[in-house]
Amino acid sequence: MDHIEMVEKLREKANVSYEEARQALERSDWDLLDALVYLEGQGKVRREGNDTYTTRQEPEPRREAEQDLRSAFTRFFSYVAELINKGNKIMVDATRHGKAVLTIPLTVLILLFLFMFWWVLPLMVVGLFFGFRYNVRGSGAAGAVNKVMDKAAETAENIKQGVRRDDRPEDGK
């Protein structure tokens, strides 16, 4: 291909003037691709329509469904993280005779219930019969929860008292 044809080809591809195309080709030793890269670097390539050529890597546009799914996951995980942070600020105390025996975050108790339900629940119920009391502190809802926990402890104490009365012999027999 002779020089005039190369200049015309570059003008067509880069949409630049004849003089700009010739100068770019001369600077790049008449290499068409290097001249196109040079013109792009100079910002002289004018774009028209969708038929443009560039050596720059542009990110592919994301599909809307992919973005919606990603934003939904982001919102979900930020909500879960917020719940975990709130749960870590709420403490559950196990006390016996007024002394704290165990203090754990609510998040840990929930995880124990999820993974070891059949161990934790019976231990907590049996603990009520051995004088343990459970209190929640650190949340506005702690008052209502503590009332329920106190009611459960009183119920366990009443059951214990009822069993003790039934064990006593009647009329000295």
Image: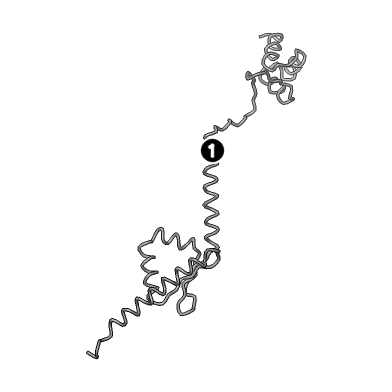
Where, quadrant-wise, is the C terminus in this rendering?
Answer: bottom left
- Vertical comparison of 23 with 161: above or below: above
> Which residue extends farthest front?
171
Q: Which residue is mark 1?
A: 68
Observer-nearest residue: 169 or 110?
Answer: 169
Number of numbered discs on residues: 1
Where in the figure is residue 89, as x and y percent of width and height? 55, 63
- Tell me: 11 left or right of 86: right
| Quadrant (top left, top right, bottom left, bottom right) of the N terminus | top right
Quadrant of res 2: top right
* Nearer to me, 133 or 1: 133
Q: Determine crowd level at label 1: few under 14, some 14-19, many 20+ residues with C-alpha closer than 10 A.
A: few
The image quadrant that residue 57 belongs to is top right
At label 1, which amino acid type do we have? Asp
Indicate the secondary structure of the residue bearing disc 1. helix
Q: Is residue 73 above or below residue 7?
A: below
Q: Nearer the viewer, residue 94 or 11?
A: 94
Residue with the most extreme bottom position: 172
Q: Residue at x 74, y 22 (%)?
A: 44
Query: What's the image's color scheme?
Result: one colour
Task: Estimate the x, y position of residue 75 in percent, counting from the top left.
Answer: 55, 46
Residue 5 position in % (x across, y down): 68, 9
Q: Residue 115, image x and y in percent?
A: 40, 58
Q: Would residue 111 be found to the left or right of residue 82 on screen?
A: left
Residue plotted at (50% across, 64% down): 105
Q: Is residue 30 above or below residue 92?
A: above
